[in-house]
Image (cartoon, rainbow, N blue to C red):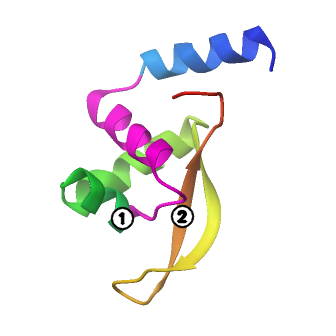
Amino acid sequence: MRQTSIMAFESIQEALGKKQRMVLDAISSMYCPNNREIAEYLGVPINTVTPRVNELVKKGIVFDAGLKEDVVTHRMTLVWRSMDYGAV
């Protein structure tokens, strides 16, 4: 990985808000979570998570990693991954 790519990623992370950083850390700590799983992991309402995930997607830090069935709702849901630049 190029040092410039790592530096760019670090500068983006510095510009994140507290809730964005919290959601990003959860996504990085989990294996392809959906919004409900992130909310459960963090102990916050899902309506706190969903907008933060969308903001992180727009910033290019988080991306859609496909679909999986949610074990609680049994509905197909999007799952998320963070950009892999080492430890986040």
Residue range (magenta)? 16-35
Image quarter (top left, top right, bottom left or bottom right) of the N terminus:
top right
Q: Residue at x 45, y 65 (%)?
A: 34
From the image, tell me which residue sits under label 2.
Answer: 79
Secondary structure of the residue carrying tag 2 is: strand
Q: CA distance from mark 2 to mark 1?
A: 9 Å
From the image, tell me which residue sits under label 1.
Answer: 37
Q: From this view, report whether residue 21 is shown above or below residue 7.
A: below
Kindly indicate the quadrant of the structure image that contains residue 25: top left
Residue type, label 1: Glu
- Judged left or right of residue 5, residue 76 is left
The local crowd at label 2, few if under 14, some if 14 to 19, many if 20 or more residues have their Cα within 10 Å, is many
Q: Residue at x 61, y 37 (%)?
A: 60
Residue type, label 2: Val
Residue extending furthest bottom? 74
- Judged left or right of residue 29, residue 23 is left
Question: Is 4 included in the stretch rendered in magenta?
Answer: no
Secondary structure of the residue carrying tag 1 is: helix
Type of secondary structure dominating the magenta stretch: helix
Tags 2 and 1 in contact by the CB under 8 Å rule? no
Horizontal and vertical percent position of residue 15: 43, 18
